[in-house]
Every structure is written in structure tokens, then in C-alpha cells.
């Protein structure tokens, strides 16, 4: 039986990592959906995976979900009533675009419930996306459902029930498509009520939020990307200067009072007791004695009927009880203080400047020119593997050669398009990427003059 597992995240990084983790653990890309605000677009449009590397990737879609563009299918952008412009990918995007429900009232709730999500939770997730969250769903089987839950739970998803309770306190009841969409908002984190003492982290100047905003705003222009300690910072090559914020966290430790109920129970128990008492009994006995004497006048009076009564007395035990107070239990409170040391970590971004040599333009030759190098690489790297022949690995080297000659990847590093390369390779050679990845990468490096 099919099941749908859903999770809401407060930020895109956690959601993207969760999607990557699902793919790495064998979940099919076509079963995974993602939906989030498109904060860089004011109008809805739709596109496909083949378009992602084109002009639209540099606009709203690229800025919003560039991290998962090579992982999910059916990448689309459209407007949802009550939410505004969104980016969606996977079966959820297909349902919204294909059925034309993106612009219809209640279309999002209907799409979620059709996927098997209870209507109550569908309202929760719709409101969560409306407030800036990122929704990730995965359709799977009963056997894999627990595995999907464990993977998503590892990436700090929102406790959707607790979050809904917080919304209700401010008057929210359910997701309403007629409601005005939120603008540039992010779902508020709710502190874990079970954790003592409370530990909060605050950025010194809020520069991290500025960095994320700057990244989204500048994503539509071609640029070089320099990796810093905590994320990515873009610099426009047309600019003469670049500003990289250095963010450092501070630890603020507070305390709060929590109440715990102490219950004193009284119970009634019974135990057997025994006492001895002396009892007296009286019994009437009849004795016949033989005699032989003349009857007297008194004896003569016995010639008449009559009856004699005698009373027997028998004592029996009588049990009575009386209650006595033998002990008192006094309940009172003692107050004391103690010092507790809180251990945590704070983060700080460090910026390192690395001068990268600009690779010289290379003239790409025919595949046969590189064949001797590929054969040498095979003989040193793969010849010892069982059943390995050069003919088996030739398609991998040729695929690396093809990637190096593809204009789409001319000025891109391997890490920037590896997911696209893996997707295309797996379509013709399913389940073999890990085996041939090193050969493909070597072919690309050699042709690009990087080896």
C-alpha cells in the first residue's frame, strides 16, 4: 500500500539536504515533491527540467531552488491563492500544473489530500508554506515509510501540530485561499518546551539574513561564486568590490520556571489479626437413676401431665472496631538553588581568499586523440576489478568527453553540474553511476585540460 510522508522545514537548506538524503538512500526522484515561496518572482510561470539550465534558472527558479534543480523533476513556478508565487517540483507540481488547480480556490488542499495527506494536516502544510516554510513530500511503500520518516526527522523538520497550536493562539483556524499572501516572511521557530534551561543563539548584527537576501537578489546575473565557511557569497565580476559579512553567534542563557506535580497517594490495606477470648457454655442434661421404694404422697402427685423448662446459657464472641490515629504525614516544600553549566557551540564565519588560476582555453580534439590516455588510466585504476575490460569502460570515458564538449558546462565546475550528469547517465545506465563515475570524471578532466 502506498503512503505519503510529508515534512515542513523552516529554511531551504534543511529541506534541500533532506531531499538529497532521500535520493542518496534510494528514493526515486519522481516520488519526491518540494514546494516553497518564490520570493524573487511576482508572476507565475511554468517550466521543465530541460529549461532549468537556461534563462529561467538565472531568475526566480534558479534563485529559489537551484540547490535541488538536478534532483527533482517537474520543476514549476505558479501562483497559489493565499500564498502567491511558489516554486514546486515533483508529483505535487505536476498535480497543480496539470490539473490547472493552481489558481483555483482550495486547489492546494485538494492536491495534498489526493496524495493521501489528511485534510487537517493539508491545511497545516498549506499555511506553513504560506508563512514561508518549505514542504517536502515523498510517496513510498509501507516498508519504506518508516525509513523516509527517519531521514526527514534527521534534518530538523517543524513539529507541525505544535506550530498549528501557536497559529491558533493568534486566531488562525484553517488555510484560506482568499487570505492575502504573506510577503518576505519566514516561519517562526517554536522553542522546544521540554528542554531546560533555555538556550538561544543570536547573530550579532543579523548579517546572515542580509547575505541570504543578497544571494537571492543577485542570482539573476552571471557571476563567480566563492565559497566561505558557512555558505555561498556572490560577487559580480562587473563590480570592483565585494562585501562578505562575517557572522558570529552569541550565546544567551536564560532560565524559566517549570511546574511538576507531586502527588501523595493514600491507600487502605487490610491485614489479618487474631485474639483469644474465654467463653462459658451451660447445657441441660437428663439423668435417669433406678430406685425401689414405696411411693409417698409427693410421689403420688406425679400422676398428672406437666412440663418443666430450664434455660441454657452459651457465650459467643462479639467483635467491634475503633479507629485510632497512629501516625501523621506532613507534606511541605523545600527550596534550594544549584548552578548548572550549559554546554553548546557557537558558529562564526571565517573568510579565506584563494587565488584561483584561470584555466587557459584548450582546443578540444577528437575522442581518438585522448584514447591512449584513457587506456592508461583504465590499466591503473580499474583493470584489477572482476570482469573489467577497457571496452566496458569506453562508454564512461566517452560520456566524460561529451560533457567536456557540451557548451552548457563550458565554464562550470564539476560540482555544479554533477547531479545533471548523473541524471542523464542513469537514464541509459541505471544503477551504474557510482561504478563509472571516476572514469567519467577523468574523461572530463583530461579533455578540459585539468589533468
Image (cartoon, rainbow, N blue to C red):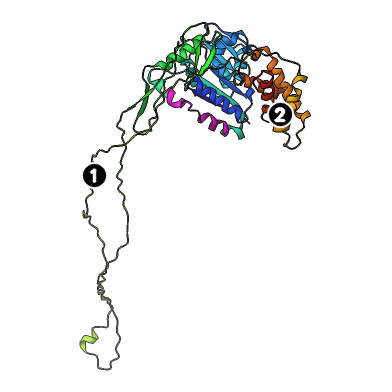
* Residue placed most toward the observer, 150 or 407: 407
Q: Decide whether residue 163 is among the magenta residues.
A: yes
| Residue 289 shows in this picture | yes
Q: Is residue 187 left or right of residue 256?
A: right
How many discs mark residues in the rendered view? 2
Q: Nearer the viewer, residue 92 or 268?
A: 92
Q: Mark 2 — residue?
A: 377
Q: Kindly state the secondary structure of the residue where label 2 is placed.
A: helix
Instruction: Identify the residue at horizontal 68%, vertical 21% (top origin).
Output: 446
Question: Which numbered circle lies on residue 331?
Answer: 1
Q: In front: 185, or 317? A: 185
- Judge whether 256 appears above or below 285 on screen: above
Residue segment shown in magenta: 147-164
Q: Is residue 83 at all visible to an observer of this figure?
A: no
Q: Position of residue 268 (x, y in %)?
A: 31, 52
Would you say residue 225 sits in the magenta stretch?
Answer: no
Quadrant where the image shows the N terminus: top right
Q: Is residue 300 above or below residue 99?
A: below
Residue 307: x and y in percent read 27, 76
Residue 281's disc number: none
Say which element carries label 1. Answer: loop
Q: Position of residue 110 (x, y in %)?
A: 56, 17
Rendered image quadrant of residue 318? bottom left
Cα separation, mark 1 vs mark 2, equals 82 Å
Amino acid at each position: 500500500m502506498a503512503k505519503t510522508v510529508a515534512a515542513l522545514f523552516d529554511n531551504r537548506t534543511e529541506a534541500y539536504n533532506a531531499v538529497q538524503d532521500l535520493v542518496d538512500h534510494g528514493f526515486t526522484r519522481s516520488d519526491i515533491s518540494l514546494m516553497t515561496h518564490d520570493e524573487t518572482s511576482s508572476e507565475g510561470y511554468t517550466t521543465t527540467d530541460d529549461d532549468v539550465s537556461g534563462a529561467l534558472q538565472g531568475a526566480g527558479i534558479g534563485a529559489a531552488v537551484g540547490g535541488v534543480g538536478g534532483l527533482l523533476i517537474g520543476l514549476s513556478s505558479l501562483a497559489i491563492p493565499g500564498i502567491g508565487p511558489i516554486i514546486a517540483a515533483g508529483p505535487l507540481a505536476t498535480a497543480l500544473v496539470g490539473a490547472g488547480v493552481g489558481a483555483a480556490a482550495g486547489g492546494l488542499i485538494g492536491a495534498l489530500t489526493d496524495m493521501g495527506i489528511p485534510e487537517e494536516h493539508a491545511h497545516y502544510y498549506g499555511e506553513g508554506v504560506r508563512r514561508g516554510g518549505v514542504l517536502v513530500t515523498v510517496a513510498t511503500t509501507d516498508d519504506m515509510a518508516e525509513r523516509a520518516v527517519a531521514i526527514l526527522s534527521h534534518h530538523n523538520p517543524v513539529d507541525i501540530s505544535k506550530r498549528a497550536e501557536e497559529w491558533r493562539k493568534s486566531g488562525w483556524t484553517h488555510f484560506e485561499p482568499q487570505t492575502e499572501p504573506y510577503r518576505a516572511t519566514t516561519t517562526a521557530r517554536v522553542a522546544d518546551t521540554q528542554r531546560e534551561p533555555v538556550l538561544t543563539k543570536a547573530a550579532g548584527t543579523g548579517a546572515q539574513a542580509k547575505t541570504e537576501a543578497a544571494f537571492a537578489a543577485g542570482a539573476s546575473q552571471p557571476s563567480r561564486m566563492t565559497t566561505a565557511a558557512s555558505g555561498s557569497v556572490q560577487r559580480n565580476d562587473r563590480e570592483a568590490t565585494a562585501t562578505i559579512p562575517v557572522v558570529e553567534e552569541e550565546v544567551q542563557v536564560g532560565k524559566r520556571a517549570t511546574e511538576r506535580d507531586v502527588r501523595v497517594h493514600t491507600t487502605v490495606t487490610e491485614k489479618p489479626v487474631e485474639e483469644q477470648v474465654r467463653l462459658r457454655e451451660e447445657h441441660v442434661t437428663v439423668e435417669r437413676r433406678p430406685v425401689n421404694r414405696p411411693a409417698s404422697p409427693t410421689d403420688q402427685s406425679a400422676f398428672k401431665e406437666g412440663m418443666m423448662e430450664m434455660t441454657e446459657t452459651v457465650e459467643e464472641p462479639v467483635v467491634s472496631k475503633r479507629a485510632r490515629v497512629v501516625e501523621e504525614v506532613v507534606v511541605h516544600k523545600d527550596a534550594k538553588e544549584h548552578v548548572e553549566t550549559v554546554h553548546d557551540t557557537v558558529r562564526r564565519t571565517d573568510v579565506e581568499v584563494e587565488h584561483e588560476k584561470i584555466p587557459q582555453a584548450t582546443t578540444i580534439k577528437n575522442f581518438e586523440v585522448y584514447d591512449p590516455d584513457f587506456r592508461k588510466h583504465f590499466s591503473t585504476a580499474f583493470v584489477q576489478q572482476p570482469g573489467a575490460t577497457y571496452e566496458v569502460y569506453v562508454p564512461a570515458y566517452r560520456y566524460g568527453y561529451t560533457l567536456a564538449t557540451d557548451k552548457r558546462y563550458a565554464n562550470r565546475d564539476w560540482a555544479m553540474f554533477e547531479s545533471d550528469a548523473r541524471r542523464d547517465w542513469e537514464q541509459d545506465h541505471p544503477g551504474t553511476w557510482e561504478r563509472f563515475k571516476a572514469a567519467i570524471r577523468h574523461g572530463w578532466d583530461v579533455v578540459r585540460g585539468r589533468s
